[in-house]
Amino acid sequence: MNDRASSLRSLEALLFISDEPVTLAVLAQALGAERSEVDAWCQELARGYEEREAGLTLRNVAGGWRLTTHPEAAPVVEQFVLASRHIRLTKAALETLSIVAYKQPVTRHQISGIRGVNSEGVLRALVDRGLVAEVGREETPGRPVLYGTTPEFLERLGLPSLSALPALAPLLRAGAGDAEAETADTD
Amino acid sequence: MNDRASSLRSLEALLFISDEPVTLAVLAQALGAERSEVDAWCQELARGYEEREAGLTLRNVAGGWRLTTHPEAAPVVEQFVLASRHIRLTKAALETLSIVAYKQPVTRHQISGIRGVNSEGVLRALVDRGLVAEVGREETPGRPVLYGTTPEFLERLGLPSLSALPALAPLLRAGAGDAEAETADTD
Amino acid sequence: MTSTAGPGSAERPDGGAFAVELPVFTGPFRVLADLILEQKIDVCDVSIAKVTDGFLAHSKEAESWSLEEATWFLAVCAIMLELKVGRLMPRHEVVDDEDLLGVSPDLVYARSIELAAFRTVALEIARGLDEEGLRFTREAGPPAEFAHLYPDVLEDVNADDLARIAAVVLRPPPLLDLSHVTPIRYTMAEAVEAVRDHLGRLGQASFRDLVADCDERIQIVVRFLALLELYREGMVDLAQAATFGEIDVRWEGEAA
């Protein structure tokens, strides 16, 4: 077995035992390899799973590489563990979560301003679920708490980083007519 | 994707999320297939791992099929466990141990709820260390395992019995004061 | 105060004559009020008590005491107080800044687009969460064979250390940081109900009667705010014969 094959083997084992996304830096150190090299190996592994229609998938989420089961295996897995990883959020919670995601760091007051309703309860629920967290205080009188999304948020969304969120700008340029239609739709 | 491929995919996913050998009976029920069929699929998967020199290996051990890391990856895995997880594990283990000590009998789910993070791995490490043990099953759906501390735990701490553990109530009250002071500091 | 000087008057009385001197702002009160309503100054940074003291002093010195100015001042103070209550009170779902302020059509327009954009991405986020919910991670950590490598957790740890850790982990999380707020237990809704109940039966009463059952000053303040709210809605009429004199309240709404 050559070095590369051996490294791929160790890499897969490390990903298997990790209970969180593993950064390239950590993997590179463990494998004694360059980050770019490890990145290429991860992509190779990921492709391999895909090609052989495996029960596992490897993806870059929340700043690291993580093995998960394939979505198509979900019905069987859910039955097996008698649990669902599905999180159901209310419309208000989703709206608030979106605002935090795009506007972070953001104060509760600013969120309420955008939503037009008090958002304290819904914000607290998001904090309780680990999707949102306090990330600091604004340096203005009263020093209000600033909120941001957590790594778990990215993980739950399967995104490598915040920059992978869908772009907001095109939506902001949309006319008010569209906006109203949209609002009516989602209500 | 045909039925067989789909079953193989689900099978691999089931083996991936299990941390102990899974019996053919359990797998067969989960997949809605015959035991002999499942056995053949497991052998096929196992051969697949071997052929592509994977980091994982699927073995038929006492009691069932078990997916684990390949022995050749062991040195890297050991280093990884030693190096990158040491501090995190100690803190997580102490937290988990303290919860078991004061809340016993307690389920894994309850512990994870209190800590706010999945505590399966760390709990198992404590069981392996002989500090925590299964003490029964909760009579609720799924009959989750209840955990408690062992005589060895008391011995290590030099305590005659669990009732000799320091009372928590005064610490909780004192802590509340600290928390307020902390809050005031950050204001 | 009479109904002739209600906030509905076409011409807003000029409050510019009255100036304030505060750490956050020095200048005409009217400007301060505008800055607060435009959310350029945080209402929580303004001591309404100090402003009120200033206004009373100003009123005494003024040659002609303007009822309209006083009414306007009171209305603005009431809004600021309610804004402040809304900002400080936890779990207060009723009061919303914009309900009180009214918002310019331009701002409403801009915000409707922004909110619609967030609602659209919220749908995508929901979809992402749904899809991701189908993937399961392995939480078991390293296989049992590697457990011997785990650090000995009880090394250098005694029972007291363990208890301290337990106390930290098991302590119920503080719900809200209220260290900066005196707890307020009285709500506008309750106060409105109390006034409505009292006046609905008797038709009219003095303010003194309406607050006879109040235990704390803050309760009286909230009851007064409730009166102003009812006045704004045209449910009550207010009359005060002399400065600091008895306020007579007459029910204008339907009988309870």
Image: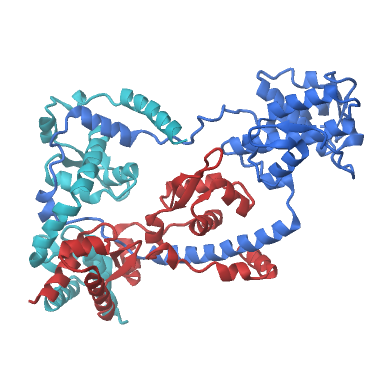
Chain colours: A red, B cyan, C blue
Please state the total of marks drawn on the protein image. 0
Relative horizontal placement of residue C147, taking residue B98 as reference (left or right): left
The C terminus of chain C, quarter of image: top right
The residue closer to the viewer here, B100 or A121, is A121
In-image side of A146 versus A31 (left or right): right
Image position of B19 with respect to C162: above or below: below
Q: Residue at x 90, y 25 (%)?
A: C63
Depth check: B35 or C181 in front?
C181
Across and down, in percent, residue A108 comes to 55, 46
Please name the residue shown 11% across and 27% down the image. B158
User: Seen in the image, is C127 located left or right of residue C207?
Assistant: left
Tell me, yes or no, if residue C192 can be seen here: no
Pinpoint residue C67: horizontal percent, then vertical percent.
88, 30
Q: Quadrant of the N terminus of chain C?
A: top right
Question: Residue drawn 65% across and 58% down?
Answer: C111
Query: x, y percentage for residue C69?
Result: 85, 33
